[in-house]
Image: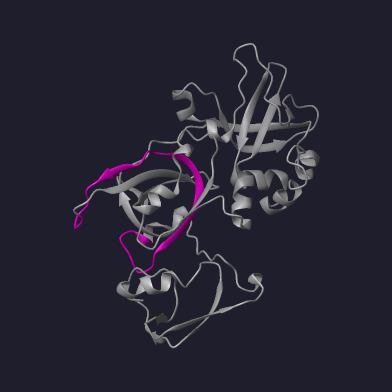
Amino acid sequence: MAKTESDSFDSNIKEGNIYKISDFTVTRPKHSFKAVSAPCMITISRRTKFTELYMAEDKIPLYYFDFTDFEQLQPRTKNNFILTDIIGLATSVSKITKIYVSNNPEQVPKRNIELKNTRGFTLTATLWGNCASCVDDSLIGLKTQPILILTSTTVSEFNGKNTIATSSASKAYLDLDIPMVAEMKAHYKLLMNAEDDIGRTSFLSFGDVVEKLLGVTVARLTVSGKKDKYVLPEPIQNRLLNQTAVFTVTPIIKGLEHGHLSFRVIACRIMDQAATSNVNLSLPSPPKTNSQPEKQITADQAPPSSPTMS
């Protein structure tokens, strides 16, 4: 659709409704900046007609995403053949700043967000223009960590790391009610309180480690925890609660720099009762030890790297 003609359709088309489209032309797809990978595209003109259809909305999904893993972004660096959809946990949100960019006489809003996937890899996302305002300032400080979806982004490289930036076609979604978001949230909710004959501490476990430890997928954990958020899912109760285990952990360095003592679980092996480390999973904060003040370690207390300008 030509930009000059889009205004005439904006007032007649509502997102989420279902329409029958007629009197359009079919052409070859663009050579770059494609929002979706398709063998052809339709061109809408003033003669194109939209007829609203009243049918069950579940017949056609409201959302469609083609997510790319953080680790698979390198081939898309400076390759704008197709735009990229990304999903991740927002671990750091900057304030909006306004800067001048080329070919624009006015300052453009900009916001940086750090994202983390379920395997612990991080990615800097730069939100431009209206997308920068899609994320509320209340998220600064990260009292909660939402799952953020960014669509139609471009991929580049800065200081040897992949980064993404929104385009004019991008949209941002926070904690969207879809299965993928529910699964990712479950990845970041496993807090383990462990004790031995010396004291107690707390461990965080993410991603594939959780699935291997419990022997179930995150999807099953999500379903198990829907009935009551204050009751541990059955796989956790059956496999971990009050069991003896040996942990392999690593300190979260950024946490130490900011005065937060936190550990990430690399591996966990259930032992027989002759072992000395007793794992106690529970929702309350871990009890106070002799050497450290009482502090509950949660995912939002592991400070991320500072946002990188792209």
Residues rendered magenta in the picture: 76-104
- Residue 60 on image: x %, y %: 60, 73
In the image, is 268 to the left or to the right of 102? right
Q: Nearer the viewer, residue 78 or 239?
A: 78
Q: Is residue 300 magenta?
A: no
Vertical comparison of 124 with 75: above or below: above
Q: Quadrant of residue 267?
A: top right
Q: Nearer the viewer, residue 163 or 50?
A: 50
- At horizontal 45% and vertical 77% (from top left) the residue drawn is 38
Position of residue 148 in the picture relative to residue 29 (left or right): right
Which residue shows up at 31% across the image and 52% down it?
157
- The relative height of residue 22 versus residue 59 in the rendered view (above or below) is below
Residue lying at 41% horizontally and 36% vertically, measured from the top left? 305
**Image coords of residue 152 (percent x, y):** 41, 62
| Tag count | 0
Colouring of the image: one colour
Residue located at (69% from left, 43% from top): 213
Q: Quadrant for the N terminus, please.
A: bottom left
Q: Residue furthest top?
A: 290
Q: Quick check: 1 above or below 115?
A: below
Q: Position of residue 230 (x, y in %)?
A: 75, 37
Q: Find residue 241 and report its image quarter.
A: top right
Residue 59: % across, % down: 64, 74
Residue 262 placement: quadrant: top right
Q: Is residue 223 left or right of residue 126?
A: right
Residue 90 highlighted magenta (yes or no):
yes
In terms of depth relative to the viewer, which is nearer, 100 or 115?
100
Asked if residue 53 lies left or right of residue 132, the reply is right
